[in-house]
Image: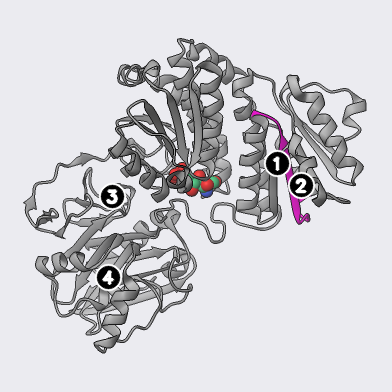
Amino acid sequence: MCGIIGFIGKNVKENLVQGLEKLEYRGYDSSGMVILHNHNFFVEKAIGSVEKLKEKVKDIEFDGIGIAHTRWATHGKITIENCHPHFSSDNNIAIVHNGIIENFEELKLKLEKSGKYFYGQTDSEVIAKLLSKRLTINKIKRLIGKIEGSYAIALISKNNNEIYFAKNKSPLYVAQGIDCSLIASDPCCFVSKCDKFYTIEDGEYGKISLNGLEVYNRNGEMIEKQAQQLNFFFKDTNKEKYSHYMIKEINESKNVLVNLIKRYQEKDIIKKLKGINIKKFNRIYLIGCGTAYHAGLVGEKYLKERFKIDVFTRKASEFFYQNDVLDEKSLCIFISQSGETADTISAMEETKKYKTLNVAIVNTEYSTLASKCDLVFPICAGQEKAVASTKAYFGQCLVLYIMASFLNGENFIEHLMSFKKDFDFGNDNKIMQLADLLINKNYIFFIGRGFDYITALEASLKLKEITYIFSYSECSGELKHGTLALINQGIPVIVIANDEKCFNKTLNNAYEVKSRGGELVLISSIDIDNEIENNFEYYIKIKDCESDLKPLQTIVVLQKLAYYTAIKKGLNPDKPRNLAKSVTVE
Ligand code: M6R
């Protein structure tokens, strides 16, 4: 993961800090920057969020060239030594790197034998130690001939006025403004500095200065890059009246619904939907990680309900090991908010040799995943900044609903309009009271059947991710096959029960928990009488809606439950420990 930024121009420090703040979603274990000033390197590093670095460099005012990095640790502890930038042994060259150098141990051994000293444990330091003196295009070419793995690298030297770069499997973009040049892991860093940018592709390398951009392909040939427009997606967003991005983004779910209703009536999208000839396929795979995988499970149900086709949802990181049948009759749907998740991209690359039709459901339309799939369907959620995915999950499920309904000839617009009309975000006070019951618990269980089990999985992920409470989700009917052994006095079990057809069965499973001392919480759209309610410590009524959309109506309430529990525990839900928003390593 990690985010890199390079800037040439006025107020270099401010621009680097601003860029790092925008890139913090890629990791916030530590950050650092180097600025070339009077042929010397000014270097600052800090453990923790970019805020810490900002404080350390507050009095610095330089124009010129600099590169900076925000880290999500993969190799080596979170220490100042391991914090980027890293430096060549002669201290003439500085580098920042996003990715993993897979052959770093072998290279490091060789370099150590030749007398090079390593101050840290990162794979990235090897890149710096392979270089010395000044940078040239040929040196970059030779460098990428030696390193294996994923990388977006920005490099500066004391003797050059350019930022050099190289890219393989980690995102990298460059841009030129009127009086500045930039390089970054995400074009969002270019907002208000320029209106066009260039995407650097795998195997490409080059340099950028105030005078222009030079890019070379794998064969060492200089190439002309096509500029892309920086569109509204990159518009800077802030927390507005909210104290955290997470709660703001949960509350934006309804906007996502509105955006999708509008966007999915437009000609280009209808044409793409028509481009999926569902009758042609024998099997459909839905592939994603984490929350996106859960959206896949929801989509699996939408598709299976409507078509007599085998549908399988796969965790992208496990896709290689399934030995699934893949051929031209397979439709692969890759789901991702960022479109940069390494496992999802690798799974997609793997399918290419089988000539599957590859569809991307993404929030980030300029992403690697989007650029490599045959058809791209946007989630239209706008930037999602909190690490915990909320409105993007909502959008992913909705796009899958639209896709399944459209392919089945249903009037999805009518259904979504009525969903929108009655949509309910839940009563925050009631949700906060439930959070009060949970904050001091060490274990929390979620159970449900069918769609409700998928909602249990997602609610449990959200809760553990930002509250650090151990949370486990289980199918209601499976409890007695093992998990029930974990239930004793005071263990909370959140029962999600929206389905009339199996409501009584789920209730019975809940009572099995209660008999063993478990504390029951009911989350349900079904009207219950007092007798039933008395069995539960707490009950939240979910607004009723059509059954396919109940997972969405329910998840917003459970996302808020995770949010308020984190707040009450004094945790920052936007930046949970050990995690990053965009997971660009396998
Ligand atoms: O960008 P993606 O949707 O591909 O990310 C996939 C997961 O890393 C992501 O959904 C993760 O599980 C979230 N942090 C969960 O809230």
Give the distance between the C-alpha atoms of the residues marked 4 and 3, in whole angstroms. Answer: 20 Å
* Camera-nearest label, 3 or 2: 2
CB contact under 8 Å: marks 4 and 3: no
Is residue 512 visible to us here? yes
Looking at the picture, how far across and down is residue 538, in whole percent?
83, 38
Which residue occupies the foreground of this view, 119 or 123? Answer: 123
Residue 167 lies in the magenta-colored region: no
- The crowd level at tag 1 (other Cα within 10 Å; few <14, some 14-19, many 20+) is some
Label 3 and label 2: CA atoms lie apart by 50 Å
Expressed as whole percent of the image width and height from the top left, the position of residue 334 reads: 41, 36
| Earlier residue among tags 1 and 3 | 3
Q: Tell me whether the residue at label 4 lies in contact with that at label 1, contact meaning CB atoms closer than 8 angstroms.
A: no
Camera-nearest residue between 38 and 560: 560
Residue at x 48%, y 14% (from the top left corner)? 413
Disc number lying in front (4 or 1): 1
- According to the image, label 4 marks what residue? 95
Q: Quadrant of residue 138?
A: bottom left
Dot 2, how many residues are within 10 Å of its Cα: few (below 14), some (14-19), or many (20+)?
few
Residue occupying the point 34% across, 65% down: 102
In the structure shown, which secondary structural element does the residue marked by tag 4 occupy? strand
Question: At numbered mark 3, what does the secondary structure look like: helix, strand or loop?
Answer: helix
Residue 449 among magenta residues: yes
Sooner in the amino-acid sequence: mark 2 or mark 1: 1
Residue that carries the numbered disc 1 in the rendered image? 474
**Of the residues shown, which amino acid type is indicated by label 1?**
Glu
User: Which residue in the structure is indicated by mark 3?
Assistant: 190
- Report, in whole angstroms, how far the alpha carbon at label 4 lies from the one at label 2: 50 Å
Residue 176 horizontal/vertical position (percent): 18, 51
Reading the image, the residue beneath label 2 is 483
